[in-house]
Every structure is written in C-alpha cells, then in structure tokens.
Image: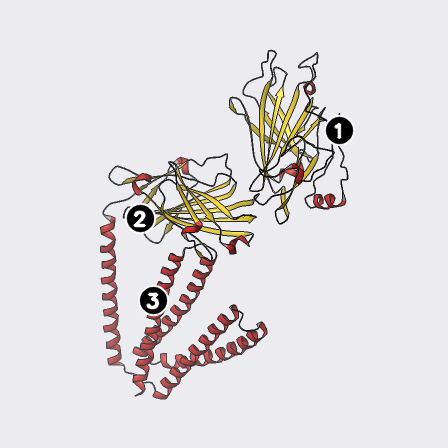
Amino acid sequence: MKRRIGPLLVCPFLILLLLTIHLPVVIVKAENKFMEPAPYEEVGLYLSKSVSVERRIEFLSGGYVMINDTFSLSIANVTGMMVGIPRNYSGYLIYYIAYDSRGKLPIKLVEGDEGFQWFEINFIEPIALSNETYTFTITYVFFGLIKSVDKNKFYVIFPLYPSLREDALLCNVTIALPPGVSVSEAKYPSGVFLNETDNLLRNSTSPLVAYANTSSWVMFTSSTFKLLRFLEIIREITVDAWGKITVNDLYEMSIANVNEITLNLPAGASHISVYDAYGIYQKGQVRIKHKNDSVVVEIVLSEKLKESNRVRVSLSYDLPFWTYITKYGWQHYALNINLTKPDEWIIHKIAVTIILPEGANFLLEDQYSKLKIEREGLFQEKATLNYYNVTKFEGLGVLSVRYQYALFWTAFRPVLLFGTLIGLISLIFILFKSSSRVETVTPALIPPEKLKEFIETFEERNNILSEIESLEQQSKRGKIPMRQYKLMKKSLDERLSLVQGKLVSLKSEIEIAGGRYADMLRRLEMASAEIETVKRSITDVELRYRRGEISSEIRRNLLEEYESRRKRAENIIEEVLLRFREEIL
C-alpha cells in the first residue's frame, strides 16, 4: 500500500520561501540516535525487511547539493533495484551515478510516473549472500537548490529521504554543513534534526515508507561559501606554420560571494595573460602554479566584476609545440591535448576550436565524427567540438586530431601572394591605359560650377556625419540629456537626408561625362563605404573587448589595422577632391 507524508507548516516565512520553487516540506520527528536494523526471521522474504539506507547530504561550495545514498541489502538473488527522487527535484538534477565496491553499476532513467523520477539500477550479477549484506551507492548532484537570500546568507531545500517503491527497514540521514559553518549559527526545523556535532545534523526514520516525498531545509551564514556556475568555456587553439601553439580561453560564469576563481590549463602553458572587459590583470592578481599534468591559475577578480552576477574572464597563453604535436610520415601530424577544466564545478558547455596553419587539412576519424569542420578563408580550416554538462566526476580525456600539412606551403604562400600582386598590378595598368585611350577619343568636360557645387555638398555631408558621430559619443558618456540628444539627432538626420539627395543628383550629372570623372566618383564612393565599414568594425571590436571575447593586445592590433584602413580611405577622398579642384582652376 502506498503511503505519502503530507506537508506540515513550519512558519509563514519558511512557506513563502518554499513556494518560490514549489517543493513540499514535511517535518519528521527526530529520534535520539541512529537506528540499527532489528533481527528478523525470514530474511529475503520481503524487500522491506531487507533494505536499509544511509543518506548523506553535503552543500558544496559553488552552489551544489550532493546526496549519497548507500543501500544495504540482506536478500539474495536480487538482480536490480528501483530508486527515485520526487519529480519536482528532477529539473535541478545535473549528475548521477551508481556504483559498488567493484565499480560503476548500469543505471537508466525510467519515465512514466508524474510524481517521481525513477532510476533502474542493475547489478552486475544476482546477489549471492551468506550471512552478509550487499551495499551499493547512488550519488546525485543538484544545482539551483541553494539560494542567496542576503549577503553571506544562504537557504537550501532538499529531499530528506530517498523514494522507493517498497518500504525500507530504516533510513539514517546526515547533513554536513559547509566548512566553517556551525550548527549553532544555522537555522533548521528543530523537530527534524538532531545536533550531535558542530557541523552535522542527523535524522532517522523507521520504517522508510514507500514513495516518500519529504523535503526539509537549512539556512546558514558564511562569508566563504560561494555560488559559482560555469556557463560556458570557449577554447580556441591555433597551430601556426612556425612551430607555435596559441590558445585563447573565454570563461563565462554566474557568481555570488566570489572573489577568486581557480582554473586549470594544459601542462607547459606559458606567457599567460588574464583579462576581462575592464582590462588586463596585473601580476598581483594572478598566481600561477606549474604541476606535472597541468598549470593552475588562481585569479583575484577585479572589483568591478565582483559587483556583477554574470562575468567573463579570458586567458591567452602558449603551449610547447612538440609536446602536443606528433609528426608521422613526411606531411602527417597529430595534435594531442588534454582538455583540462575546473575540477570543482559543472561546466554546462565547453566549445573547443582548433585552427590549423594555412594549407593544412583535417584527417577525419570515426572517434571524432562530431567534429564540425569549417573553412577559414581560402586556405585554412578549423574544427569545433562541443561538450555539454561536464562535471568534475568526468574526464574529457585527450583530444587527438590528425591533419595533413605540406612543408613547402610556407614557401608557396609568399610566391602565390607575389603572383597575385603582379596580376593585380598588370590588370590596373591595362585598365588605366584603356581609360586613357577612351578619354583621348571622347573627351568630356564638366562645368567648373558643377564640380565646385559637388565638392561643397560632399564636404557638407562629411561635416554632418562628423557631428552625428560626436553627438552619439556625448550621449554614450552621458554629457547631454536624452531628450536633447533626440532633438539634435533628428535635426542632423533631416539635414543629412537633404544633402544626400542633392549629392546623388550631382553625381548623376557628373557620371554622364564618363572617363576619368566616372572613375574618380567610383573611387570616392568606395572610399566612403570603406570608412563606414571601418566605423562599424571599430564599434564591434570595442563591444567584443568589453565582453571579454578578445584580449587588449588583439584589440590594439585590430584598432591599428582599422585606423590604417581609415586613413588610406581618407587619403583617397582627399586625392579625388583635389583632382576635382584642379579641374575648376
């Protein structure tokens, strides 16, 4: 017969907190000590007389609840067992595993029950007992059951007992509070738990009824307990043709009460730089420890990041080439890298991207069929592999990727570029000669007044664009009220629209002349478009830098490149306008 324990009111404050996650709470009276199974005559006749459970609940720093249920069976010829958790906890479950003294046990989810999430555990072989007991353990890890209710104050709700389909003889429960948290400072339902030590709470019940759906809670204060959740790690590994491996890592996290984080990098990592959206970290903020199998990086977060709930931290570093690259044959290589990760918390997603040197190609193998191969430009390939919900109990192992790379490519690339450059110069020369012949045969003149009007209109357009850019910068810095910004922006947009219309009309009249006039207008138009493209690219770079997606060095290099492109475009515009002015004289 199925029996359920109904909810009991503790206090209005407790009920209000519990309703936020819709989990029932039942207070069960505590006994004075852990119970020992009473002797019984017909061992193995009923499962309820043959099962006892030891449940241990721990609150892991990072915001995780770990539950270990150790079952003791005194019945022979059993091939498996069904255990479960209340359905309203299943959405918070991120990891589970069953094992005995010999290793892992097969475990699978069993659906179909609206009230419970069941797990079917199969034993390697039927239990054979001779005046002994067989024990196995199932471990659950939950995230989201620990809430931050105030500064340094945390509230936890959890399933008090395991759920079984038959009654069990007894269940002993131990709650281990986080290090540094004493029972005297914690709050909990006193009718449920006994305080036997400084940081342990205990409860016992006998029998443990079938289909138990009992919850309880603890509230504690700690200045060292953290809520830290790794949302995503993006690792980009670049192999170049000159014997260098460069890695860029991006860690996206949600945090509370976190001042420091510890990250693991592959062994041999050097030239390590740490940065976030606010800049690069100084040596005093980063501690690096080299181990045989990894490099541990301890990072003191910047003050601005500590105030945020969601943060991004990036690392860039080099790896020793021949430690991770193996050559076999005259043009075949293998990248073998241990995918290190933080070992204290779950990572919900890890994305690893490998970028090969130009001219190299991946050699696909069955074990990495999930590799997504993409082309980066004309001569370069990259591969991406995603992992989901990776816990500290799981090792990613070694990622081994094979590729083919011809040694002569490093010499072939400059030759190819030089040939392309010669071809472009030849094409430009031919076009220029052709244009000159056309101008000689069909000369066309534009009235000087028309060219002067075009120059003045074009410069007016540039001035308005500069005013708009300056206005937007002032608005972002909060130097002008939003209402004033909108009025001024609207006025400038109207002026720009009129000037653009006039400029289009003048361009049409000048283009009719063809020849060098049409060519100069095309150059002018392309240079103007290049400037707008560069502006958008600069905005994108600043945004990516603030998000922590690129380092300050990459940002500086990109900005220098874009500024160089902008100056070249501006020089072209000045040259064309100067040519037009010469026509006026």
Residue 226 lies, in percent from the top left, at 56, 44
Which residue is at 49% across, 51% downward? 301
Q: Amino acid at mark 3?
A: Ser
Instruction: Label 3: state its secondary structure.
Output: helix
Mark 3 or mark 2: which comes first in sequence? 2
Instruction: Label 1: state its secondary structure.
Output: loop
Q: Are marks 3 and 1 in contact (CB under 8 Å)?
A: no
- Give the residue pinned by disc 3: 564
Mark 3 crowd level (few <14, some 14–19, many ≥20, 10 Å Cα):
few
Q: Are marks 2 and 1 in contact (CB under 8 Å)?
A: no
Residue 367 lies, in percent from the top left, at 41, 35
Figure disc tally: 3
Q: CA distance from mark 2 to mark 1?
A: 66 Å
Mark 3 or mark 1: which comes first in sequence? 1
Which residue is at 53% across, 72% downward? 479
- Give the residue pinned by disc 2: 240
